[in-house]
Image (cartoon, rainbow, N blue to C red):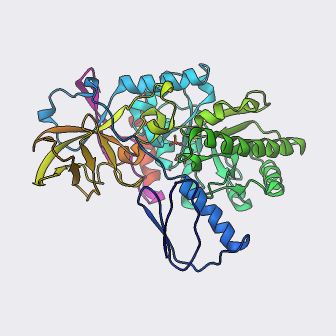
Amino acid sequence: MAKSIPGETKAQWRFGADTKIETNQRRYIRIGVALGSSNGGPAAHLRAIIEAAMSAQKSILSAFAWDHRYRVSGVEDVLTPALVVYPEFIASNIGRTLALLGGDADRWRVHSKTAKLGHTLRMLVERGVRNFKCATTLELLVACQRGAADVLLAYPSIGANARRARKIADQFPEVRISVLAENDEQVRQWRGSRVGIFLDINPGMNRTGIEQTHGGKVLTLARAVNDAGLEFRGLHYYDGQYGGLDERERTVAAHRGYDSLLKLSAEIERSGVPVREVITAGSPTLPCSLTYEAFRSRVFVHRVSPGTIVYCDATILAQLPSEYGYRPAVLVLTRVVSRPRSGIVTCDAGHKAVSADAGVPTCVVMGHSELTPLSPSEEHLPMALQEGAAGPQVGEALYLLPRHVCPTVNNFDCALLVRDGQIESVEKVSARGHEAPLLRSLDSATSHERRETAGTH
Ligand SMILES: Cc1ncc(COP(=O)(O)O)c(C=O)c1O
């Protein structure tokens, strides 16, 4: 059974075996289960999960006008595809965010999975942003090396990964480090360490965390943290599922979640365990967290945790109010390598350069609304050329605004830093990928690395 869904967020469908759901972005979700259409029970539960997934389908900008400030001089010497970072625009995006936070850099716990470059982390630190969030032990290490004061490893760490995080915490006693927990075992494994614990609450994203309605479990775990002799830092609540909703619906949904979150936090306080910090929001729900008045008047510190806004991409620029004034600060420079038939132009930015995880089109070609990126292969990106348009010639350079900048940055070993059109340096994408997989080898690298990075922050 295949059913076409007219809108991304008001989807209605019946479930059957191998149900195929078509969104208006022509992406398919296959559900290989047979379910009835009863109200309640597993079908309703799954429907709720799929509705949340559908609302996460994100729209993107359809075009982005050319702006001469993005031109790179000396492009003939640049190997493509190349990641280009523009520090002036990074500085402007950081400044815009600080202005939205009333100038209080301490309210931002920036996610470093977007920034990734030591250079960018340093720019954040220089502007007073010293609270970070990260998802990998490599991001944790790099944030500690680049001057972070407080880093939350916002990922469920288990086994060898937890032991590695503990080592990094020991290596940087001057940095306050915390982790997430959602069950007893995850609390117990940190006994005897110096890390603080945030309880991860599932805001309906259904990825990690304790269900928001399970207040009893949250209370028991908060007490267990204290009983284990660990510091209970507060609640982590990443409501990243609302990116596909329009701004008004997004705000209503996010505020409803915050109401429950505050009730939960008050219950914990009443039980005698102080909640010091509550963390909400990525980039799309930043406006929702900013307009939630109750966050300002609480006893706890409220921090927001957007990361994408440091660089911006074609998705977040479509989701945030244009008056916020964010600009793309990272592009992919590519060249036309072929025109295999009329109506098709191919450049060298396949999905090993511009990430395809958010769907097709993977990017917007700046200043070329006549080009529509098609499905990429590893190193090729064919694009449809509007009928009657001349289009770029083979060898011509193009500038791509990624649909999802975070994994795109992660695709590159290094980036060109371009200021005023001039290539100023080649910067390492320091937190790219993951650390080497064997704990033993990392232990021996640690002291060497520590010496190498001393004095870099
Ligand atoms: C746990 C967590 N916090 C914060 C963020 C940052 O959100 P955004 O990329 O929308 O800025 C993410 C993004 O994936 C995340 O997973």
Q: Nearer the viewer, residue 91 or 26?
A: 26
Q: Is 416 situated left or right of 286 in this image?
A: left
> Could you tell me residue 296's position as x and y percent?
73, 27
> Residue at the location (27% across, 56% down)?
376
Q: Nearer the viewer, residue 66 or 38?
A: 38
Residue in the foreground of this view, choosing between 35 and 231:
35
Quarter of the figure with residue 187: bottom right
Q: Is residue 185 above or below residue 385?
A: below
Q: Position of residue 271 (x, y in %)?
A: 89, 45
Location of residue 157 by image quarter? bottom right
What residue sits 21% from the left and 54% below the top?
Answer: 380
Q: Quadrant of residue 49?
A: bottom right
Read off the magenta span.
412-441
Q: Quadrant of the C terminus?
A: top left
> Is residue 229 at least partly visible in the picture?
yes
Can residue 196 be seen from the camera position used here? Answer: no
Instruction: Say whether residue 418 is left or right of residue 200.
Output: left
- Determine whether 46 is above or below 215 in the image: below
Percent of width and height locating residue 122: 44, 28
Quadrant location, ligand no. 1: top right
Instruction: Tell me which residue sits at (63%, 28%) in the image.
Output: 107
Above or below residue 187? Residue 196 is above
**Front one among 198 and 34:** 34
* Count of numbered circles on the image: 0
* Rendering coords of residue 341 (x, y %): 11, 56
Q: Is residue 424 magenta?
A: yes
